[in-house]
Amino acid sequence: MSYINENFLNMQDSYLFSTIAKKVAKYTEENPDKKIIKLGIGDVTKPIVPACIAAMHKAVDEIGTQEGFKGYGPEQGYEFLRNAIVENDYKARGIDIKADEIFVSDGAKCDCGNIVDIFAEDNKVAITDPVYPVYLDTNVMSGRSGKYNKEKDMYENIVYLPVTAENNFKPELPKEKVDMIYLCFPNNPTGTVLTKEDLKVWVDYAKENNSIILYDAAYEAFITEEDIPHSIYEVEGAKDVAIEFKSFSKTAGFTGVRCAYVVIPHTVKGYTKAGEEIELNKLWNRRTCTKFNGVSYVVQRAAEATYSEEGKKQIRANIESYLENAKIIKNGLEDAGFTTYGGVNSPYIWLQVPKDMTSWEFFDKLLEEVNVVGTPGSGFGPHGEGYFRLTAFGTKENSIEAIERIKNWKVN
Ligand code: PLP
């Protein structure tokens, strides 16, 4: 008899994007003459910049020669990339991170999901809500969530930290003691951010309670405001309590190329039941060497090229253009009378749907009456109800046209 991991039976099926796709397909079939504008996707659309393409071509030619051939690389990533990350993402911001505290991977999704391997099953987990669903789902799979409560759409052992207009999208410290805290800023889906001061509260909490902060900064490159930290390590004390996840996906359009990294400073410690302090870096290194054989050389050269002078300029231009779309969408929605959040340090604009509507009802109306597709907030967690996400990853023309249609629309 082979028994299954029954935690998987405790997972709720996610119908969010498949339901959206089905609704759009049905509407398109019934209304073939209508031009639908999709502002629902969380994927980039601009091609990989020339500096990265050139680096990949060069690396491809190199591995086709006897001298340049590469077999298995270091599981943690090549030194050239780890050093480039240290120099550009940390040293340049006055943060002291060592190359052996960086682990290069094939995506922040895998990293955020796999990190649960090194933590005990009985840790209490806190997750901001609404948020990127991977943190919750991977804790359900690994047995930390407790039972699902259908009525509340919540798991009984998870501490949900609401981020809503009521608290200005700043999660409040939990009343009970928690061991693992997931924070994602700039946030997906709300597009909102925390200042250094806001984050300091969490770092202090983690220090006091011997908790670990799992900080997802996948959208860091979209930060435009001065006092918003690009890394949690800009906050004093964070190097003792935080693991940071970063990705080249949204920064450099690598959603298909695949490259990311995790930072685990040697000073971040977990505990055995006997009270012994253990470096999490060591555990993650052991896990990485056992379960992962590294990111391809060609891809790591492309990631390195994002830090070249040319690369930096080119990826900055792409981000600026997504941010310009975000401004068009946000300002347009405000002009049309909607209350919006995010969109300034993020490609995501989070809008409040009219009070008498659910986020799915708003989705249907927007699709049917102005042919614009977005994502209902309730798909990102119970506290997402009443909100709706639009993204700036479309073209400028489509962003403008979608907003023109919304401005000329009477939602009620
Ligand atoms: N973290 C957040 C908050 C995301 O929204 C996403 C993707 O949408 C990821 C991580 C995934 O990143 P990657 O493409 O590196 O796996």
Image: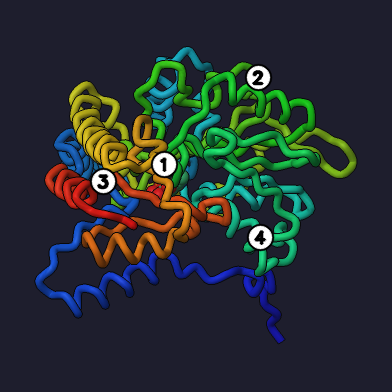
Determine whether label 1 and label 3 are within 8 Å by CB. Answer: no
Residue 139, image x, y percentages: 64, 56
Check residue 222 in the rendering and tell me which mark sits there, or answer none: none
Which is closer to the viewer, label 4 or label 3? Answer: 4
Check residue 260 in the rendering and tell me which mark sits there, or answer none: 1
Query: Which one is earlier in the sequence, the residue at label 4 or at label 2?
Result: 4
Query: Which one is earlier in the sequence, the residue at label 1 or at label 3?
Result: 1
The residue positioned 62% from the left and 24% from the top of the image is 238
Residue corresponding to mark 4: 154
On whether ligand 1 comes within 8 Å of the CB at mark 1, the answer is yes
**Is residue 95 rendered to the left or right of residue 107?**
right
Q: CA distance from mark 2 to mark 1?
A: 24 Å
Is residue 208 depicted above or below 162 in this figure?
Answer: above
Which is closer to the viewer, label 2 or label 1? Answer: 2
**Is residue 385 rendered to the left or right of residue 369?**
right
**Amino acid beneath label 1:** Ala
Residue corresponding to mark 2: 237
**Amino acid beneath label 4:** Met
Q: Residues within 10 Å of mark 4 (few under 14, many from 20)?
A: some
Q: CA distance from mark 1 to mark 4?
A: 30 Å
Which is closer to the viewer, label 2 or label 3? Answer: 3
Q: CA distance from mark 1 to mark 3?
A: 20 Å
Q: Nearer the viewer, residue 207 or 96?
A: 207
**Amino acid beneath label 3:** Phe
Q: Residues within 10 Å of mark 2 (few under 14, many from 20)?
A: some
Q: Residues within 10 Å of mark 3 (few under 14, many from 20)?
A: many
Q: CA distance from mark 2 to mark 3?
A: 35 Å
Residue corresponding to mark 3: 393
On whether ligand 1 comes within 8 Å of the CB at mark 2, the answer is no
Residue 68, image x, y percentages: 25, 41
> Can residue 106 be spotted in the picture?
no
